[in-house]
């Protein structure tokens, strides 16, 4: 058989299941505030890379918060390098809510169960299985491939991709593009239709702290400068604000693909496109784009007062804001307006929005790899409503795509599994992912 049609060997298909299960059993819960230890998972990955002749580098900013980086040299020295990254930490899981223990890694009826099964120890395991299969078969990719297994993605990334981008940029020399989580999973808006959304952008993060000042005093007196009332007014305006539609190139491309697929007669290039009408006509498939046609601002935390009959002089709230690429100034101006004269606001945490081209050769190859293994599936570009490590790596000039291929059965809702209860992944889905990644990464 010619090399380009030779897929991953049977060992790779076995290993991806074992690796996913065993990585889940290594509890890397990230509770934020530095409460996490990725080192055992990093060592697990590093040992298996080293055994395949791929030299791993272990890097820590904080003891126990370990990242692994390795480079596989490509056959074309003139080609730009590709970054493939996955995080090793997971969000917390409460065993009382789960059918099986979230850190059991149990394999039952062809399904691997546990926290991280889709976010994203599955991808960590798939990449590991693929590159070990190449080592056994003597395969080298065309481009240099840099592998990064990161710590701290589920919190600040300061011990993970942020630290790598700040302090170890040399390890990513030549990388122009990257692939990672949150894309290329199957999505079934209705029976008989399979979509594969590939992420080509992320909304930016704009977490805000609001501070209202007023006149402190007795709770029984008239007070027209009550900080709590001022804060509450501002929070209500921000929470119920309808942001205007702002279509990015990626979202417009997604709408065009979906409109064509559903034979909806609306010109998606029209400058005054009625997006809400189009979303309505798309039905359940609208879920792919609806969260990213606008900015958003959700009040999430409130802090004021200490006694029921005392009006405090100050009240504080936090807002989870998210911004589409190119809307940052508009977002800030809107906040000035919505907060009003008595409430100050500042950024509590801020990350850039990302947008990757969907008319690039890389997007075409990602699309082709999925369609090769599921010819019935339709690839649709999309923008992530939140953020990933790709934001940190973008500082190194790396354009990120969300591409962790999984073909899930129609009754498994990827969106609900992500950070959800009873997170799990079918063995078949992992095998699909290994085949797609093997094919894509060899020819990337
Ligand atoms: Zn993730």
Image (cartoon, helix red, strand yellow):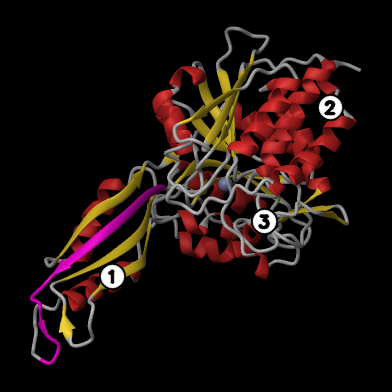
Mark nearer the N terminus (2 vs 3): 2
Of helix, strand and loop, which one carries label 3? helix
Q: Is residue 213 left or right of residue 303?
A: left
Nearest to N terminus: mark 2 or mark 1: 2
Q: Main secondary structure of the magenta part?
A: strand
The answer to whether residue 24 is seen in the rendering is yes
User: Element at badge 1?
Assistant: strand
Query: Is 14 situated above or below 245?
Result: above
Q: Quadrant of residue 37?
A: top right
Residue at image location 23% in from the left, 62% down from the top: 210
The label shown at residue 7 is 2
Q: Which residue is mark 3?
A: 414
Depth check, mark 1 against mark 3: the one in front is: 1
**Is residue 229 shown left or right of residue 288?**
left
Instruction: Give the residue displayed 24% in from the left and 66% down from the top.
Output: 316
Question: For the residues carrying marks 2 and 1, which lies nearer the camera in this image?
Answer: 1
The one nearer the camera, 313 or 402, is 313
């Amino acid at each position: 058989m010619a090399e380009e049609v030779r897929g991953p060997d049977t060992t790779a298909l076995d290993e991806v299941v074992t690796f996913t299960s065993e990585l889940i059993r290594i509890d890397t819960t990230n509770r934020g505030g530095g409460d996490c230890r990725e080192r055992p998972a990093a060592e697990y990955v590093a040992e298996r890379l080293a055994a395949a002749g791929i030299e791993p580098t272990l890097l820590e900013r904080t003891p126990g918060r370990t990242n692994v980086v390795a480079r596989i040299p490509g056959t074309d020295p003139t080609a730009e390098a590709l970054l493939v990254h996955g995080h090793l930490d997971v969000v917390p899981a409460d065993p009382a809510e789960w059918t099986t223990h979230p850190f059991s890694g149990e394999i039952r009826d062809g399904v691997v169960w546990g926290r991280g099964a889709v976010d994203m120890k599955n991808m960590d395991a798939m990449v590991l299985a693929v590159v070990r299969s190449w080592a056994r078969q003597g395969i080298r990719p065309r481009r240099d491939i840099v592998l990064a297994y990161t710590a701290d993605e589920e919190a600040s990334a300061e011990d993970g991709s942020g630290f790598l981008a700040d302090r170890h940029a040399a390890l990513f020399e030549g990388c122009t593009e990257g692939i990672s989580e949150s894309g290329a999973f199957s999505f079934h808006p209705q029976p008989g239709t399979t979509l594969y959304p590939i992420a080509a952008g992320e909304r930016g993060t704009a977490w805000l702290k609001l501070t209202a000042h007023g006149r402190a005093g007795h709770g029984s007196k008239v007070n027209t400068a009550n900080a709590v009332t001022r804060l509450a007014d501002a929070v209500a305006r921000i929470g119920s604000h309808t942001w205007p539609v702002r279509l990015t190139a990626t979202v417009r491309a997604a709408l065009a693909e979906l409109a064509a697929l559903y034979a909806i007669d609306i010109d998606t290039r029209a400058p005054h496109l009625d997006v809400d009408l189009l979303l309505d006509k798309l039905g359940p498939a609208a879920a792919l784009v609806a969260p990213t046609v606008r900015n958003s601002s959700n009040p999430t935390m409130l802090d004021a007062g200490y006694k029921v009959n005392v009006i405090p002089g100050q009240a504080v709230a936090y807002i989870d804001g998210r911004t589409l690429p190119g809307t940052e100034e508009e977002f800030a101006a809107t906040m000035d307006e919505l907060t009003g004269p008595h409430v100050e606001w500042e950024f509590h945490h801020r990350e850039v929005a990302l947008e990757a081209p969907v008319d690039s050769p890389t997007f075409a190859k990602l699309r082709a790899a999925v369609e090769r293994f599921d010819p019935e599936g339709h690839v649709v570009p999309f923008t992530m409503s939140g953020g990933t490590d790709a934001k940190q790596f973008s500082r190194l000039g790396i354009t990120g795509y969300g591409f962790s291929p999984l073909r899930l059965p129609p009754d498994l809702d990827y969106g609900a599994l992500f950070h959800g209860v009873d997170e799990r992944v079918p063995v078949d889905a992992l095998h699909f992912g290994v085949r797609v990644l093997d094919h894509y990464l060899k020819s990337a």
